[in-house]
Image (spheres, helix red, strand yellow):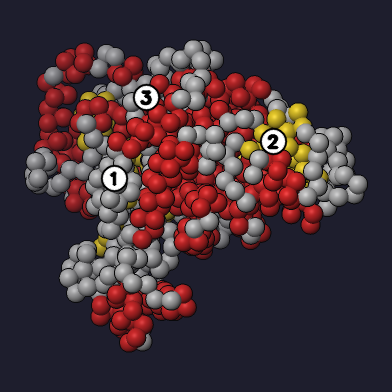
Amino acid sequence: MGNALASETSPYLLQHAENPVDWLPWGPEALARAREEDRPLLVSIGYSACHWCHVMAHESFEDPAVAALMNRHFVCVKVDREERPDVDALCMDAVVAMTGQGGWPLNVFLTPGQAPIHGGTYYPPEPRHGLPSWRMVLDAVAQAWREKRDDILASLADADRRLAGGADLRPADEVPDASLLPASVERLRSGYDSMNGGLGQAPKFPPHAVLLFLLARASDAAADAEERSRAAAMARQTLRSMASGGIHDQLGGGFSRYAVDASWTVPHFEKMLYDNALLARAYVQGWLLWRDEGLREVAERTLAFLATELRGPEGGFLAALDADSEGVEGRFYVWTPEAVREALPPAEADAAVRWFGITPEGNFEDGTTVLEDRGPAPDAAARERIRAGLLAARSQRVRPGTDDKRLAGWNGLAIQAFAEAAAAFGRDDLLDVAREAAAFVRRELVVDGRLRRTWSHRAGGGAGPHPAVLEDHAFLLEALLALHEAGGDPEHLTWARELADVLEQRFADPDRGGFFSTADDAEALLVRRKEVDDAPIPSGGSSAARGLLRLAALTGEHRHAAAAEGWLRLVAPAAGSHPQAVAYALLALDERHRPAREVAVVGREEEREALLAVVRERLRPGIVVAHGDGLHPEDDAVPLLRGRTPVDGHAAAYVCEGFACRAPVTTPDALRAALGD
């Protein structure tokens, strides 16, 4: 039979296209029907890789009796949170305010005017564990709407103000001074798990933005030695603990979304593009800081996972791999001793069982084990043979499903990770991956001069109808700057400048500063929000601030720095109470307070690369790099390169502060000295 979702392109929405529920996608038709029929909206939000979304769909949305109840009382709307992060954020804030917790699936009841009446996350088909059944919730909301509507509407009179996110924040008079940075490191210590790394206890999520901030503080030679040591200890232990735990795929690389325990042992098995892109950056930076080869191996295996498992044949990076295969969470990834012995020769099987901690009892369900790298490891050659043998056996299993849509912003995160790794490791193949993904986004996701949010191969292939939001523009801005610094392509800087103009013209708040999450010409929701917190990805505003600061350093255009500082003035007060929630803003603030330094390198490629290697051999937050041949210095499209020429036919590096440059140097040792190494 089917419903209105059958014509959608989102894999998540299509999973519900055969439900007996009369689902509509979010949009004018659903909103108009709710107003015309005077019925509440039932908005159910999830994503393709979400295990509990699949569970609730099977238990409730596929049940004809439950569907009939939903259809009778509500206008039912399905939302892919990855397609519509604006709708998701509005509903999530409402549920957190009502219940104290959030997550997915997210089920929210709204008035026809979009104000939230009631909501929650997963509801079982029968009451259990203190949760009402889904049918009980449906009956209660329907009855309240019939009998207590006036009371409900009166209680929602100021809903737009309460759900404004950061839109009603008043900015500080000045950008916070640098003392906020060590104070934030100290506050992070109070929630740090000194036994397992990471923040808090179970469930435990990879703290990407916090790690990037801690790595920046650990690298700051001007910081107090004790602060550097504490930041380094927290970052390094967390990186190592995650790498050795079950949250990290010990065979195929890549990280799952989160661990259900404090020790990173048992994950929820979905693998998200954004987690892996952000964690790859953190592991690359950890290697730059400590030259820990174990961190480099994790970074390279994570990037290899992205390049092989999450790239589409048409181009671009895919959104996610599901947690489930054959309807069972984690089945693709877990092992028993017997399965290992079937896959490997006896000696290697014995070594694998010890290395990965595989026991008859298991650490997961039904005597199965999630692999951990916490036992005695065999030598490098044996490790590779074991991995290859187990991967070959695993490849015969039914693979988890793939959410194969492309998201502009998440592709930006991946492009940035590959570009930064290419520069750090000197690997042109990684640079090629980044360039190809950027070309895909430019070719497929820019329509009539404006960036779109999604692309799908369905319906003939093409960009979806949803306009890109703040995070898409911001993540792509950072990515293009990283790609320009790694590869030197002027067109990437040109595109970055175009995106910055859109950010400042379409998303900036001229009255209170900062950035709205949607453009000024986007569909109007109950309220136009500002997303301050990093959850589960960096705040789009904080990413925009960092990108604009770096663009200002590369171009000398102060207006970009002023826009970035508007966000920092808005957000920074939150760091005083919960730095873990605004860590990416703190990363931008860290770079804002470092001495402004730009490095321009010009000359023949071979000599130029030798000088660039010096700049890239250490973690140097806040430094921006431009490079080119220097043959036409007055016409160069890159402002930092204008007027910079080789010296006596040799490649030269110019170390500048605010575009005021010292005398050029031509040798690696001289450049190290100029950089203060």
Name the residue nearer the viewer: 177 or 28. Answer: 177
Which residue sits furthest bottom? 346
Nearest to N terminus: mark 1 or mark 3: 1
Does residue 598 appear to the left or right of 185 in the view shown? right
Q: Please tell me which residue is depicted at 52% across the width and 45% down the height of the picture.
A: 413
Q: Quadrant of residue 182?
A: top left
Q: Disc 2 designates what residue?
A: 598
**Are the residues at dot 1 and dot 3 in contact (C-beta closer than 8 Å)?**
no
**Number of callouts:** 3
Circle 2 Cα neighbour tier, 10 Å, few/some/many (<14 / 14–19 / ≥20): many
Q: Amino acid at mark 3?
A: Gly
Q: Earlier in the sequence, mark 3 or mark 2?
A: 3
**Residue shown at 33% from the left, 38% from the top:** 189
Disc 1 residue type?
Asp
Return the x and y of residue 42 as percentages of the image width and height. 26, 34
Residue type marked 2: Glu
Identify the residue under disc 3.
576
